[in-house]
Image (cartoon, helix red, strand yellow):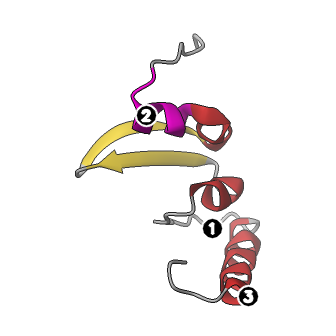
Amino acid sequence: SLGLAPIIVAEVFDLIGRLAATNISILIVEQNVQKALALASRGYVLANGRLILEGDAASLAGGDIEAAYLGISRPRAET
């Protein structure tokens, strides 16, 4: 979405949401993390080409991403 007009960004994310509702798998590479995670079921965070964090979108949106980038250790729930 970088560099796109806000109305175009809204249209693109609306379309992605409609496609995702049809059970089509979609890979999104996006710097607007909160907007992307709102549509996603899972997320993966890369730093310098390495996977540093992965999980369900809700837990990532709940702060795991900020913790990873700020170097904060957060206790993880046992699964």
Label 2 neighbourhood size at 10 Å, few (<14), some (14-19), many (20+)? few
For residue 26, side relative to residue 50 (left or right): right
Q: Residue at x 66, y 81 (%)?
A: 9
Label 3 neighbourhood size at 10 Å, few (<14), some (14-19), many (20+)? few
Label 1 neighbourhood size at 10 Å, few (<14), some (14-19), many (20+)? few
Quadrant the N terminus occupies: bottom right
Name the element at disc 1. Answer: loop
Give the residues drawn in magenta, as a range: 64-72
Name the residue type under label 1: Ile
- Residue closer to the observer: 7 or 78: 7
Q: Residue at x 69, y 83 (%)?
A: 6
Distance from Cα at disc 1 to Cα at disc 3: 24 Å
Q: Nearer the viewer, mark 3 or mark 2?
A: 2
Q: Which residue is mark 1?
A: 24
Distance from Cα at disc 2 to Cα at disc 1: 33 Å
Name the element at disc 2. Answer: helix
For residue 66, side relative to residue 15 (left or right): left
Of the image marks 2 and 1, the number of the one nearer the N terminus: 1
Name the residue type under label 3: Ile
Does the magenta portion include 65? yes
Q: Which residue is mark 3?
A: 7
Q: Which residue is mark 2?
A: 70
Q: Residue furthest front?
A: 70
Q: Main secondary structure of the magenta part?
A: helix
